[in-house]
Image (spheres, rainbow, N blue to C red):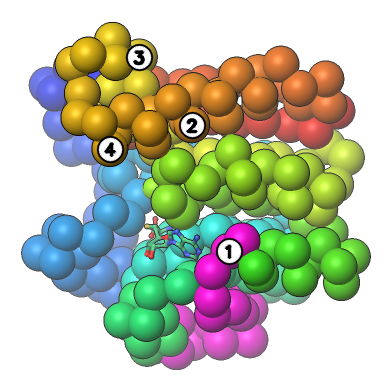
Amino acid sequence: MIVNEQITAYINSLEPEQSKQLSEMRVYARENFIPILKMETQSLLEVTLIMNKPKNILEIGTAIGYSSILMSGCISEDTRITTIERSKPMIEQATKNIKLAGKEEQISLLQGDATDILQQLVEEDRKYDFIFMDAAKGQYITFFEPCMKMLMKEGTLFSDNVLQEGEVAQSRYGISRRNRTIHARMREYLWEIKHNKELSTSIITIGDGVAISIKK
Ligand code: SAH
Ligand code: MG
């Protein structure tokens, strides 16, 4: 937790009750250690979507479909969500959940590694006005280039888990070797989105750290 636990617990206690399906999915995720959106990050994503009114959303990292279903609840009916997932058990769960939510028309799940799928989408000349980056943290920097090609002017890039429990800001000696590489890559990503001339980015210490970037 980056922010004081008490403040976070208080903020979360203010959250109104959500749909039965989403709250059951949240319990499932907690019990099965699936890193879905943190409660306090959820409303930031919702507010950002309501402000931006995107028409085409790309999500990298579906997991069980929690964030896809959540997003579908605060966009217009004709807005499409394309979401990418490589893990077979996750794909199975997500397919089931999206069907249960009655959102198969609106949410298309692309199965496979995002590295390949993003390349394919670029070749197909796809454009998105909202990209939700939420896959393997060490890969954000490699997903960045294809995402920039597909992100429309004034579109939003919403990146989750960018501070890794705050460890991204810690001295490299305090963390394991594996995490050190992931964190170095995440720092590279954060540096890029802050310095890229085409973007305007704000890094927010909510949840596990979120970066919101707008393409100028
Ligand atoms: N967006 C979800 C949580 C995603 S968790 C939510 O908030 O509800 C991250 C997911 O990304 C995991 O399910 C993992 O399998 C997937 N993932 C990680 N790296 C990936 C890659 N390179 N290609 C496709 N999926 C990937
Ligand atoms: Mg996340």
Q: Are marks 3 and 2 in contact (CB under 8 Å)?
A: no
In the rendered image, which residue does mark 1 sit on?
Answer: 114
Label 4 and label 1: CA atoms lie apart by: 21 Å
In the shown orientation, is residue 69 left or right of residue 34?
right
Q: Residue at x 37, y 82 (%)?
A: 88
Q: Position of residue 73 (x, y in %)?
A: 52, 64
Q: Residue at x 49, y 23 (%)?
A: 187
Q: Indicate the amino acid at tag 4.
A: Arg
Q: Are marks 3 and 4 in contact (CB under 8 Å)?
A: no
Label 2 and label 4: CA atoms lie apart by: 11 Å
Q: Earlier in the sequence, mark 3 or mark 2?
A: 3
Label 1 and label 2: CA atoms lie apart by: 17 Å
In the rendered image, which residue does mark 4 sit on?
Answer: 178
Q: Earlier in the sequence, mark 3 or mark 4?
A: 3
Q: Is residue 105 magenta?
A: yes
Q: Position of residue 216 (x, y in %)?
A: 85, 28
In the rendered image, which residue does mark 2 sit on?
Answer: 185
Q: Nearer the viewer, residue 144 or 184?
A: 184
User: Vertical placement of 169 versus 102: above or below?
Assistant: above
